[in-house]
Amino acid sequence: MKKALSIFVLFISFSIFSQQDSIVKVEINASNLTEALNQIEKQTNYTFFYKKKWLDDNIIVVNEKFEKTTVAEILKFIFKDTDLNFYLSKNQIILTQNSVIYDKVATNFIEKDEIATINIKPILIKETQKSNTNTDNDNLIVVGKESVTKQKVSFEISGFIMTKKNGSPVADANIRIQKKVITTTNHKGFYKLMLPYGKHSIEIEAPSHKKTNLTIVVYGNGTKNFQLDETITELNEVIIEGSSDKNIKSITSGVTSINMEDVKNVPLVLGERDILKVATTLPGIKSTGEGAAGVNVRGGKEDQNLFLLDNATIYNPSHFFGFFSSINPYVIKNAEIYKGSIPAEFGGRLSSVFDIKSKNGNSEKISGEGGIGPVTSNLSIGTPLVKGKSSILLGGRATYSDWILKQIDNPEIKNSKASFYDLILKYNHQFSEKTAIESTVYYSKDKFNLTSDSTFNYSNRIITLNGKHSFNEKNKAEFGISNSEYKFGINFEKNNQKSFDFGFEVNETKLIYKGLYNYNNIHKFTYGLNSTLYNISPGTLTPTDENSLLTYQSIQKEKGLESSLFITDNITLNKKLIVGLGLRYTNFMALGPSIQRKYIANAPITEGNITNEIAYKKNKAIKTYNGLEYRIALRQLLSETISVKLSFDTNYQYLHKLSTNTTQSPTDTWKLADLNIKPSFGQQVAFGVYKNFKGQPYEISLETYYKKSKNILDYKIGAELILNEHIETEVLQGKGKSYGIEFLVKKTSGSLNGWIGYSYSKSLIKLDSQFNEEIVNNGDYFPTNFDKPHDLSVILNYKFTKRYSLSTNFIYQTGRPITYPIGSYEFGGNQYILYSDRNEFRVPDYYRLDIGFNVEGNHKIKKLAHSYWNISIYNVLGRNNPYSVYFVTEQGKVKSYQTSIFSIPIPTITYNFKF
Amino acid sequence: MKTIRKIQNILLINVVLIACNACTDPYALQSSNYQNYLVVEATLTNGLKKQEVKLTRTYRLEEREPSLEQNAIVKVLGDNGSVFLFEEENEKYVSIDEFEPLPNVAYRLEIETENGKKYISTEQILPSVSNLESIVAIRKTNDLGTDGVEIQANSFDPDNTSNFYRFTFEETYKVIVPYWSANNIRILPNNTIELYPRDGETKTCYSNEISKRIILENTSNSIEDRILNFPIHFVPQSNYKIANRYSIIVHQYIHNAISFEFYKTLKNLSDEGSSLSQVQPGLIPSNISCLQQPNEIVVGLFDIASISSERIFFNYEDIFPGTDPPGFLFECETLTFNSRDFNTLNFNNGFYAMKSYINSNQLIYYENTGATYKLVKLICGNCTYFSSNVIPPFWQ
C-alpha cells in the first residue's frame, strides 16, 4: 500500500499538504530514523507509512527541539541528507524513496513497483513550489518520466519560448543553469537542450523580457514551451552575462570574445564604437600607435592577423589610417579573437584570427539602430522578408570629417578632403530547422584629397555565401564561398606631364567546408577543407597625360592557390580533462604566368647574383610549399572554478605584407611566397590559469606564451618596395621570437564593472646570414618595431543609476623602438647620418586617459526609439604621446622632432538610438 | 618610384597634421649614446697612380666636421705578395709609390690606428675595365618642366661583365664678372683718389663643383651591358654655370656587386632624409672589421673599381642659340659717389662714404666719369673673391 501511494503526483499533493499542515511542537532524541519517526508519531497525530528498509539505509542521528513549526519542516530537516521524500495526506505521512513522478497522472503511468530498486537519488521538492499543470510557466516543471530501463544520464528537452502577450517567438533567449548559458533560442524561439536527470534551477532571459526563474525536474526527453513577460523598456535588459564560465570551461586559451554591447561602455576617440580599439585594450593585442592601422598580437607582425567578416578575409580593417575600424559597429554581432590555439579550421596567418560575425536582420519586425557623432553617422536596419524565415540587414556609415580639416590653420590642408563610408547588406534565410543560408555583401571605401595634387583611395569588398545544414543529430556541416578584394590607388596631378595613376589590388576567392561530427560523448570531430585562390596586381603606374614624362609601368601579377585539409578531435576524457587534437595540412602553389629570377646558391640575393630567369606559363606551379600544422590544446579543471590550459600550435603563412613604415599604412602591398620568398612558419606554446568565483562576477586569468617563427620578412637598409619587380633583393627573412605573460582581471557585472589587463612581453627578430650585407645588428636578436614590453589597460564603468554611467579607460605602454641617428660621418665629400643599431632606442612611453559619460533616454515603453547619449573626452590628461620621432637636417645640423596625433583632450558627443 | 614615395610621405605628414595642428615638437636627441667610429673611404682604381685612402672619425650630430684619423699605418696587400704602403699627406693617406691594382689579384686593406687597433678588409678584385664611350650635352625639359641642358653618358661593355656603374662628375665653368675694371682704387692719406692697375686676372675665372649625388646604374638586368643616354646631370637654362663656357668631366666607376649595393643603400638613405621616411634606416655593413673587436662598427668600405673618364665643353650658344644667357651668379648694382662732396654727414654718396666702403674692402672700383665714381660689390667686380683665376690645365 505504501508503495502504491508513492505514485502520487507530488505537486498535486503539495497543494493539499500546504492547506492541511498544522503547527506542532516536537522534541526528538533519536539515534536512527525509525526512532525519530516513532517519536514524531508519539508527539503528534501523524502516522507514517514506509518500508523499514528505507530507514535502515539512512543512518542518521537526530537531536533537535522543534517549536512552532510544521511537520513538513521537521521532516525536511530530518530528511535533508537522506534519499527520502515524503507526502502528507491528512494525518498520514507517506514516505517515498526514489519516487516516480509524472506530470500527467493518467496518461503516462506505466511503471510498476520496481522503482525502489533503482538507485537514483530522490528529487526533493520544496513545499513552496506551487504546482499547476495547466499553464506553461509553472515555477516547477517536470519533463519526461522516470524509467528503470533508461540508463541515459542526460535527456533532450526542447520547445519554444514565446511572449506572453501575443505568443510571438522570443529569439536569442538565453537559458542558463547556475549562470551558465546552456542554450539560446533561434529566431523562431525554438530551443533544445540536454539536461542530466534530476532537478535544475533554470533562468530564462531574453532581450526585452523579464528574467524568469524556474525549477525543472528532468526524468526523460520531452518538450516544454515557455512564455515570457515583456519588460517595460528595452534599454535596461541587456545584461550579457552569457558564457560567464566560458573562460574556464572552454578548451582554447588565448581566445577572447567581444560582444558589441560591451563596447558601448568604453570611451573612444571621436565617439565611435570600435571593436578593434577594444581588442587592443586586452592583454596581448597592441596597436602600433594612435592613428596606425593594424594590430600586433603576441609579438607578431601586423600581417599575421586574419580578419574575417562572415568567413571572408578583410585585408584592411580600418578607415582613415586606423582611426576607425572599417566595419560598422552596429552590424557586428560578436567577434572571437584567437591569440593562440587557433582552431584548425583557420589558417594562413601566424598570430591571430579575428572572427567577426555580423548580425542577422530581425525576422519578425523592422528594427534598427543608429548613431550620430561628430565625425561619422551610422544606421542599420533589419527587416523580415518572409516573416520568421528570412530577413535582411542593411548597415551604412558615412563620414563628414571635412569640417575637422577646415579647422586646421594650414591652407594646404584646409582645402583638402577626406571621406569614407562602408555598407553592408546581409540576407539570411532559414529553410527549415536544419538548413539555413546567409549572404553578406560588404564594401568600404576611403578617399583622401589631402593635397591639391594627389588623391588617394582604398577599398575593401567582400561577397560571401554561407550555409549550414544539420544532417542528423550527430552530423552537421557548414560551407561557404567568399570573395574579397582590397585595392588602393594614388592619383597624382602635380603638373600635366607628371600626372599618374597608381594602383594595387589583391583579390582572393575562398571556399570552405566544415563538418561537425559528434561521434559520442567523448569524441567530437570537426573536419573540412579550405581553398583560397589569390590574385595580386602588385602595382601599375599609368601616366594620365599624353605628354607625360612617365612611362607605363606594371609589375607582373601574382597568383597562388592555398589549399588545406583539417581535422580536429575534441576528446572529453573525463569531466575535468578535455584534449583537443587538430591537424591542418596546407599546400601552397605559386602559379604562373610569371618570370622568376634564379640567384646563385650560397650567395646573397642581389642584382649581381642572378643566374637566369625562368618564365612560367599560365597556372604552371612556380613553387609548391607543403606544411603540416599541429593544433593541440588541453584543459584540466582543477576545481569547479579553476582550470589550467596548455596549447601548442604551428602555422604557415604564405602571404606577406610589405611595409618599411614602422606602422601599417594603406599603401602597404602584399606579396605571395614564390621561388625566392619563402613562407613564414610559426610555433606557439601557451599555458594559462583561469579562475572564476562562484556567485561573484569576477574572472582572473594568467596566460603565458612562447613563440618562435622563421622566415619573417624584414628589410634591408634602404629598401624600396613599391613598383619593385624584385622584392627578394630588398628583403631579409629572419627568425622571430616572442614571449610574454598576460594578466587579466575582469568584473563582468554590477554597478562597477570592467577589466584590468597587463602584459609583459618581448618581441624579437634575428637577421643573421653568412653574408655581411644581410646581417642586421651583428646577427643578434633585436626588438621588433612593435616590441612594447609593458602594457597596462584599465577599463572601468560605473553605473550611478540605470540611466547614468561613467566609463574610464587608461592605457600605458612602453614606447616603441626606433632606429636613432647617433652621429654623422663624411663619405665621398658628403655628409651622412650614422644610425644606431636597428631599433636600439625607444620613443617615450605612451599613456592616455579617456573618460566617457553615458546617458540613456527615458524608459517609456511607447517611445518611438530608445536612445542614449555618449559624451566622451579622449586624452583627458592632454598627454603629448609621440606617434613618431623623425630627424631632419637643418642648416647642416640634424634635428629631431616628434609628432603626436591627439596631444590635447578631444571631447565628443554622440547620439545613439535603437528602434 | 621616388615620386610615389614622396606622395606617401606627403600623405602621412598630412594625416598627422589633420589631427593636430601644432603637434610637432622638438625632441631631445640622446647624443650621449654617441660613439666614435672609424670611417674608411678607400677606392683603388686602375691606372698607374698614387692611390688614396681617407680615414676620418664619425662625429656628433651637433658637430659640423669630422676629425681625421691621424698617424695610422695604412697598407694594401695583394695576394701576389705585393705590399703598398701609404703615408699621410693633405688630410689623406697617399701611397708612397704609384701602383695600379692588377686583374685577378686580390687585395686587402690593413689599417693600424694610433691606439693600436687593427682593421682589415675583405679581399677585393679589380672588376672588368670598360670605357665610358661618350658624354653628350642635350637641351631638354626636365621632370619639373624646366628648360635646361642634360649631360648624358653612353657606355657599352661587349663582354657584358661591367654591369654596376657609378658616376661622379666635376663641373668647371667660366665666370666673367659683369662690373670688371682693370684698375683698383685707393684713397691716399691726403684724401686723394688713386687708380692703379690690378694684379693678375680678375675678370675671368674658373669655378669648380663636385657632384654631391650618388649616380648609379645597373645593367645586369638588361639584355646588353649598355648605357644609353643615361642622365648624369641637369643644369637649368637659368643657371649661370652655363652662361659662358662650361665643362664637365664624368668619371665612370665599375664596381663589383657588393660595393654597388653599398652605394645603393647609401643613396637610398640620403635621398630621403625627410620626416616619416619610408626607408628603413640603419647602419650600412662595411667590409672592414676590427681584428681585436670584431663587433666594433666600422663605417665605409674598401673596394677596387675600374675608372674611365670623359670630358666635354660647350658654350651657351651651342645649346641655347638665340636666347639670352642667364644673369650673373649674384645680384649686382653699382653705387655712385660724388667724390667732391666732402660733407661728413653724407653717408650715402659723399666722399667719406666712398672712402669708408673702399677702406673696409666692401666695394671696389668699376668706373668713373670725372668726380663721379661707380663702385660695386667685390664679387661683382673681381672673380677671385669666389673663384679661381688659374686656367685649368685641361681647359680649351
Image (cartoon, helix red, strand yellow):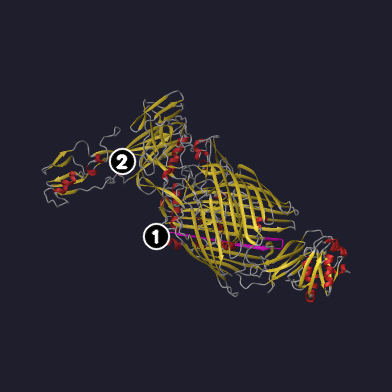
Q: Which residues are magenta?
A: A410-436
Q: Is residue A651 left or right of residue B14?
A: right
Return the chain for callout 1. Answer: A
* Residue located beneath label 1 in the image: A409
Tag 2's secondary structure?
A: helix
Residue A12: give x, y in percent of width and height: 80, 73
Dot 1 crowding, Cα within 10 Å, few <14, some 14–19, many 20+: few
Query: Image height check: is A648 above or below A357?
Result: above
Query: Image height check: is B317 above or below B256?
Result: below
Q: Check if residue B84 falls in the magenta segment.
A: no
Query: Quarter-wise, where is residue A683 in the image?
Result: top right
Q: CA distance from mark 1 to mark 2?
A: 49 Å
Dot 2 crowding, Cα within 10 Å, few <14, some 14–19, many 20+: few
* Residue located beneath label 2 in the image: B318
Residue A865: give x, y in percent of width and height: 57, 71
Quadrant containing the C terminus of chain B in the rendered view:
top left
Query: Image height check: is A536 above or below A30?
Result: above
**Residue in the image at 51% along x and 40% along y:** A729
Residue A372: give x, y in percent of width and height: 52, 66
Query: Quarter-wise, where is residue A143 in the image?
Result: bottom right
Q: Is residue B19 visible?
A: yes
Image depth: mark 1 or mark 2 in front: 1
Of residues B140 and A18, the one nearer the viewer is A18
Query: Image height check: is A894 above or below B307?
Result: below
Q: Is residue A898 left or right of residue A333?
A: left
Q: As shown in the figure, which amino acid type bears the numbered disc 2?
A: Asp
Q: Is residue A106 visible?
A: no
Of residues B4 and B30, the one nearer the viewer is B30
**Residue in the image at 59% along x and 63% along y:** A261
Q: As shown in the figure, which amino acid type bears the numbered disc 1?
A: Asp
Of residues A628 and B257, the one nearer the viewer is A628
